[in-house]
Image: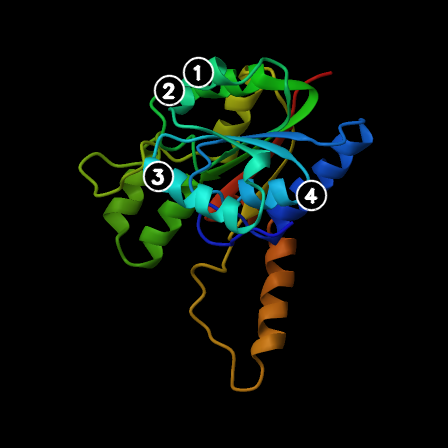
């Protein structure tokens, strides 16, 4: 399964976790795993999942993004495996049967919805017993560190003290950023058991060094190997650009 790798779309480490879950879903006798992508945008996850043999429902209000999704699905020949729902994530329960999803994705979603608690509760409701939930969320500690390293120390101090991880009057379009504790609590309170949290983009999006001529391939490999290790090593995990939480609904 391939997916684009830019902000909010996940690294190789995220894809590895999701590919393992697909195998586990099939081992639970789900020949065609059911995936629900909440806020799935233009299909950077949905299309690869469909190509891997899943039945995918994408819930997304942005019509331009859905048009891109439908074009991608047609180009890859998987349109018949993707159901498109043009609605907000708050309406998830109206479109997806309770307990029907083997895997639910909520990538770059919780930082922009009005009521993350209700959205996570709805996600838990549509997840099958024994099924999994994958969350990618902007990390507030990464935002603090970025401001400090660029000399915006007053902003960094204010942001560090702000539980929501955003500053009023800022040009930021996010409603909140999460940290490990806040993300874990949010999932726990919805009845989901967090199996692990890893970082996504520890240094890959901020590193300023470049490979010397003739070493690009080895440099990229070294960076990928570092990211894979740093993603699961606290405290490096805790300053990644995004946090990837993987949780399961009790059987």
Residue at image point 43% right, 40% down? 138
Q: Which mark is residue 160?
A: 3
Residue at image point 61% right, 62% down? 224
Q: Quadrant of residue 223?
A: bottom right
Q: Earlier in the sequence, mark 3 or mark 2?
A: 2
Where is residue 58 drawn, in percent x and y?
49, 31
Is 248 positioned to the left or the right of 212 in the image? right
Total marks shown come to 4
Q: Nearer the viewer, mark 4 or mark 2?
A: 4
Q: Nearer the viewer, mark 3 or mark 4?
A: 4
Q: Residues within 10 Å of mark 2 (few under 14, many from 20)?
A: few
Q: Earlier in the sequence, mark 1 or mark 4?
A: 4
Q: Earlier in the sequence, mark 1 or mark 3?
A: 1
Q: Are marks 1 and 3 in contact (CB under 8 Å)?
A: no
CA separation in Å, label 1 and label 3: 26 Å
- For disc 4, the marked residue is 19
Res. 33 in view: yes
Q: Which mark is residue 118?
A: 1
Q: Are marks 2 and 1 in contact (CB under 8 Å)?
A: yes
In terms of secondary structure, where does tag 4 sit? Answer: helix
């Amino acid at each position: 399964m391939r997916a684009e790798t830019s902000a909010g779309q996940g690294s190789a480490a995220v894809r590895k976790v999701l590919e393992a879950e697909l195998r586990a879903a099939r081992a639970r006798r789900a020949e065609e795993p059911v995936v629900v992508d909440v806020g799935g945008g233009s299909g950077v996850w949905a299309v690869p999942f469909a190509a891997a043999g899943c039945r995918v429902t994408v819930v997304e209000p942005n019509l331009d993004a859905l048009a891109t999704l439908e074009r991608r699905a047609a180009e890859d020949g998987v349109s018949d495996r993707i159901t498109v729902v043009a609605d907000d994530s708050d309406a998830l329960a109206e479109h997806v049967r309770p307990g029907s999803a083997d895997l639910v994705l909520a990538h770059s979603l919780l930082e922009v919805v009005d009521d993350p608690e209700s959205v996570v509760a709805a996600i838990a409701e549509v997840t099958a017993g024994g099924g999994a939930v994958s969350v990618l969320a902007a990390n507030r500690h990464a935002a603090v560190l970025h401001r400090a390293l660029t000399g915006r120390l007053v902003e960094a101090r204010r942001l560090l003290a702000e539980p929501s991880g955003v500053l009023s009057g800022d040009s930021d379009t996010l409603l909140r950023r999460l940290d490990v504790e806040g993300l874990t609590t949010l999932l726990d309170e919805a009845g989901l058991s967090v199996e692990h949290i890893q970082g996504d983009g520890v240094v890959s999006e901020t590193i300023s060094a470049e490979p010397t001529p003739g070493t690009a391939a080895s440099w990229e490999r070294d960076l990928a190997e570092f990211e894979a290790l740093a993603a699961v090593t606290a405290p490096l995990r805790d300053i990644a650009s995004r946090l990837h939480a993987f949780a399961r609904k009790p059987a």
